[in-house]
Image: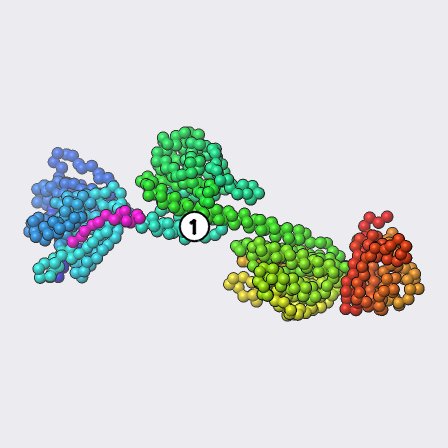
Amino acid sequence: MSPVHPLDDAATARAVIDENGTLVLWNEGARRLLGYAPEEVEGRPAADLLDCADGTTPSEPTGTRWSGTLPLRHRDGHTLPVWLLAHRSGTKGEWLLVTPLHGEDQRAYDDPLIRAVLTQSPCAMAIYDERLRLYGLNEAMAEVIGLPEARVRGLRISEIGGKPESEQLEESLHDVLVSGEGRDVETYMRTGGENRAHAWLARIAPLTDAEGHVRGVCLAAHDVTEQYRARERLQLVNEASVRIGSTLDVTRTAQELADVCVPALADFVSVDLLDPPEHGGEPHAEPPSAPITLRRVAHRSVNPGSPEAVVTLGAVDVYPSASPQADSLIAGRTIVAPDTTTTLEQWLAWDERRWERIAKCGIHTTMSVPIQARGQTLGVAVLTRFRQPGPFTSDDVLLAEEITARAAVCIDNARRFSRERETALALQRSLLPQSLPRTAALEAASRYLPAARAGVGGDWFDVIPLSGMRVAMVVGDVVGHGIQASATMGRLRTAVRTLADIDLAPDELLTHLDDLVVRLSEDAGIEGATGEVGATCLYAVYDPVSRRCTLAAAGHPPPFIVPPDGLPRQVEHSPGPPLGLGGLPFESVELELREGTVLALFTNGLIESRGRESDVGYQLLSRALEQSSHSLEWACHAILQALLPVGGAQDDVALLLARTHGLAPSQVATWDIPADPALVAPMRKQAVEQLDTWGLSEATFTAELVVSELVTNAIRYGEPPIRLRLIQDAAILICEVSDGSHTAPHLRRAKTFDEGGRGLLLVAQLTQRWGSRHTAEGKTIWAEISLIGED
């Protein structure tokens, strides 16, 4: 037999009354019941159909569902008592009234179909016929829906339930009726016989007769609330393991804990932490003592803006011994306070503002869970309910403790990381130059930014004054991050300064530095391996007298130069291999720079970025350098703004900008000296005359002695050509003597009756500093005489 469509209006009397009490819908079943056609009653007050002979009128129903018997006036004039079931719409305020029509299709209660199902089923059961009308149900199902069978027999399930879930179940009943195949439907709803929602498993099966024809549908309802909540708890724990601890940031981790618990476990959650000990110490292992000062790190509410919060984010509050926060921290266990009027009376009397907030929000239950990890007490999480009607159960306590324990480990990890990061940053800052030296050769500005997430690294920069007014600029990058990279950077920076002090050429300096990195790899325990401690480096030397810059690179990007009236361009130079490969040569390139030229040295963290090609980074840097005519400090800021993402660099960034200055020819005097001892006196005289020309007569005595000793040594022990050069600046006077010998001078202890051996000792005593450097033609001995404080 073909089933009748579920929407059979003739079998149910149905009417709809709007919020004003006016009938707006009257179906065929209602006409059959009371005799009125739709056009006779629609638009009229529903109260006109009541026949209250005693003068009393029914009270207005409350809630969303009502049932009862009302005396209704039939069209022919007689009174008809009718049992009605009414559902209220939450959006329009309308009432839907239904009642089944019992006719000759009524079947006996002891029908074999009904008796077979009800006698064999241990759970709530209901039978629907081929029209999806309720055919029968057992007592268990009557308790679930909250209505007796006699009242609802003949109604559809959507008419009995009056909820969207009921309509979805009706669609499933229809599918089973048509297909003849059973199905299971899970739903979470509050039925008419319940005071709170439950999880239900509805098992729907077709009922067939002896010939195999589908005669109806059986619905068996199983309360699976415990299994449902167990799955929810498991899902929440799994969600917590994924969402909590996504970063090594204490505040972010605490906020993730609050976000996970709202609204699944509580309506409002606050996370308060103890401030860590000063100077990076370990937290105390013993429990804190009351009163306890806590800092609000995070909170979350089901209401926007968290109006329940008494303490603002970042602020501190003091909790006395009567408060659940302090009690749970001191006891080291979870405390649930179900009654704020008694359990928390002493605390709330002490904090009137908190009591007013609790009363205003309707908070009825709180749970304080201590945040503990690795034997240390870190803080407390307070979970609050005001919208959820039920108190916290023992399962809720276990779930909150499980989630909080996971968050506690993440918070402790974040604190340890922050502490070690600060230590590493302090170490790195101590290894980097605190300020750049002021030199006559150039003015410089720099920036260093550690990686946003990877922590400290091995990038460094330096400006090193050299002899002859020259200055060295260096930028380097050690592979990797962390303390080890910072320590390696410190060793390499010290090595560069030491090698620069003996005035090695850039390519020679990188060769020695390469040997050092190879030895560091061997010291790391990798015998015979190279490249385990990798690094790149760029070393440049600028001479303000010749206005030439010599540079060499080991796996490092070439610098940019910006002429005073030109566009930025990158130096055309192929860098050598990175440091640590061993045995491979490095080459120098020499540039002639006009006064006012800007050099930009940087590490690859400035150029390279995720999702951006390095060529794009070079273009951005070139455009930013076009503004370098402003101050170098301003230019550094503009470059970082243009190239680095908002969240910070993904790798360390070191940037060094230098604007070159040149010495005027009038500040330099040079003489070529034949290798004749008799010319020492004339050279002293010419030097003194040059000092008089410069207005430096006060330095005559020291300069005359230094010139005499250095020229004498060059003639006696050196080889031609011999050259004397004096360089004058506002602060120092430099005396240089060059010769063709590569033998470096050294101080020696002269004996009492020795006629010589005291010249360099006198030079060392009378000058600010002195030294020697090798050149392509031989060597140069130099000495610096301070002009500050001369009498």
Task: Give the image location of residue 356, x and y in percent.
Answer: 41, 33
Q: Quadrant of residue 614?
A: bottom right
Q: Quarter holding the N terminus? A: bottom left
In the image, is residue 64 above or below residue 701?
Answer: above
Q: Residues within 10 Å of mark 1 (few under 14, many from 20)?
A: many
Q: Secondary structure at mark 1?
A: loop
Q: Is residue 543 visible?
A: yes
Q: Is residue 298 visible?
A: no
Task: Give the image location of residue 14, x and y in percent.
Answer: 17, 49
Q: How many marks?
A: 1
**Disc 1 marks which residue?**
244
Task: Give the image location of residue 563, x and y in percent.
Answer: 69, 64
Amino acid at circle 1: Ile
Q: Is residue 579 left or right of residue 542?
A: left
Taking depth in this image into account, of 175 and 528 the one nearest to the observer is 528
Task: Give the image location of residue 568, x and y in percent.
Answer: 65, 65
Taking depth in this image into account, of 481 and 242 the one nearest to the observer is 481
Q: Is residue 140 left or right of residue 583?
A: left
Q: Residue at x 10, y 52 (%)?
A: 116
Q: Is residue 238 a member of the stretch shown in magenta?
A: no
Q: Residue at x 34, y 43 (%)?
A: 396
Q: Residue at x 43, y 47 (%)?
A: 407
Q: How is the image coloured?
A: rainbow
Q: Quadrant of residue 769?
A: bottom right
Q: Is residue 219 a member of the stretch shown in magenta?
A: yes
Q: Residue at x 35, y 34 (%)?
A: 339
**Range shown magenta:** 218-230
